Image (cartoon, rainbow, N blue to C red):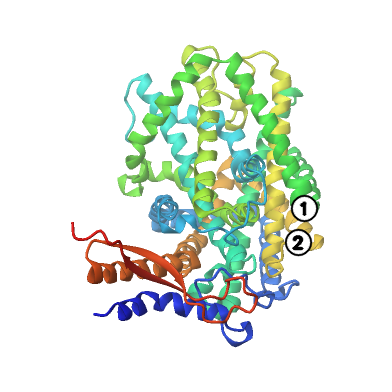
Amino acid sequence: MSRQGETSRTSSAADRLRRVAASPVDDVVPHPVLDVAPSATDRVRPGLDRVVFGVTAALALAFLVWGFISTDSLASVSGASLGWTMDKAGWLFVITASGFVVFVLWLALSRFGAITLGRDDEEPEFRTTSWVAMMFSAGMGIGLMFWGVSEPIAHLTTPPPGTEGGTEAEAMKTAMSTTLFHWTLHPWAIYAVVGLAIAYGVYRKGRVQLISAAFEPLLGRHARGPVGKVIDMLAIFATLFGSAASLGLGALQIGSGLEIVAGLDEVGNGLLVMVIVVLTVGFVASAVSGVARGIQWLSNINMVLALVLALFVFLVGPTIFVLNLLPTAIGGYVADLPTMAARTGAEGGDTSDWLQGWTVFYWAWWLSWTPFVGMFIARISRGRTIRQFVSGVLLVPSLVSLVWFCIFGGAAIDLQSSGAADIAGAASTESQLFTMLEAYPAATATSILVMVLVGIFFISGADAASIVMGTLSERGTTTPRRGTVVFWGVATGAVAAVMLLVGGSEALNGLQSITIVAALPFVLVMVGLAVALVKDLRADPVVLRRAYAREAVEQAVIAGVTEHGDDFVLSIESTGDGHDDKNDGDDQLVTVTTTSTGAGPR
């Protein structure tokens, strides 16, 4: 084989690429290996999508009317729906949640990890500290306040099925590992799937900020048709009920705090509804102010206040016990992870009931939050690589959750075990944090701080939810009209009130059951989203360029060995084809050739 023939083979890919790049833009579609910004014509026209908004708004209003007029009927239907969901689809929640953890880790560690969520040379839009603060506050801040004490204590006093009968130390280890299972890698992996799909589509491919737009690799033009509208409507419903559940939890905890701080009698539904109204007004006002002025400002304030509260409990509480608990909790989590991830209703009725109140509820809750948390994380993650995105979204909040539960859960476990306070015997789940704080100095001040934190945590998360529901209702615009945002904000507050009424005296059960049922359809959307994202990434310019480069170098090595044996080097040469009108070298064809070193045989 002649050297000329081999050189022609090795340079063919590069030649084709450079000829396309040098051709007039109007004459040819840009080559797929080039990082070319999509044209503005790819975007859907702005404005209210009357089908998406009209259908979802009508169904939301129908739910509200049903709940206020016939609460018992709604409670009966939701209970029956929950039973069917747990019986027929509980396994689906369990499998997909763990599958998403594996999926995002694979993306970060694979060849796709170097792809930028934006142009190749784009820098991150937000500083890392603000990025982490906004992501964490929007993702689960209010949940940490509600469950930081309650969940470790619940698992300590009532261990998960199959773990009963151990020593006190084993019970503590199981309580912490089960809590971390629900609050670390799994929820943030679920968020990361939607965040990656949206951020890649918007900043890399120039698509609109819609869940349906991320399905274009699978559905093509149908992603903008009726099928796409159904996907966006499911996303709105999941967001509405997920954020309403959080608002209900926040109202319960603030109501419990008012009982203790203000010395009120048992808080009834009337006061809880008033709390919901106040929080709703707060997050609607924040939402209409926009991301930079609203969410970022609140998130940074809350991060500081949460740090102050955590440091206080760490210093006045069992400091050494908490420090010892950190490695113990990590070890227990790693050791128990396979068992916890494989637990399903097949293990019996007790396990199924436990999953309904804990694991499946959490997976459904996280899934219902994914449209707005994922889209919000995508909104603030422009310019980061997939590897940076996954590292930040998966690991940083997980580490914060680990420290948070070790401080608050550890303090509660220490008080419970020593008999200094009966945390498990508190009047309600939502009051257990306040019961723990009463065992330490400045209980009134810290209890007030907790209520402030719960309120701001919810506001900073729910205003993101209102904006995202507005975005989904207005064809993906990043700045939905205030009227749309206000409508969804008010609807969230009203749905939260109905969910509390459905639960009756067991308000938490009402929040959990409706959340699980509402999240079920979105599980299938999430699976499709992951498939569409992989199909997108396989055609990314970074991936294609590597394939071109690998082919060119491989063929050059074959040519070099054929022509010169072991004694050759690769060189890059310009052919000088005359296309360089500006004489700056940009339009010169480049070829990979082999040259003998002249060293002779080895």
- For the C terminus, the quadrant is bottom left
Q: Which residue is mark 1?
A: 290
- Number of numbered discs on residues: 2
Residue at x 46% of width, y 70% of height: 539
**Visible residue check, residue 98:** yes
- Could you tell me if the residues under marks 2 and 1 are in contact, i.e. CB atoms within 8 Å? yes
Answer left or right for 309 relative to 294. left
Q: Nearer the viewer, residue 456 or 249?
A: 456
Answer left or right for 330 relative to 500. left
Residue at x 46% of width, y 80% of height: 16
Q: x, y (%) of residue 124? A: 63, 51
Q: Secondary structure at mark 1?
A: loop
Mark 1: few/some/many CA within 10 Å (<14, 14-19, 20+): some
Distance, label 2 to label 1, CA atoms, is 8 Å
Q: Which residue is mark 2?
A: 479
Give, as a three-letter code, the residue at label 2: Thr
- For the N terminus, the quadrant is bottom left
Mark 2: few/some/many CA within 10 Å (<14, 14-19, 20+): some
Residue 241 in the image: above or below residue 556:
above
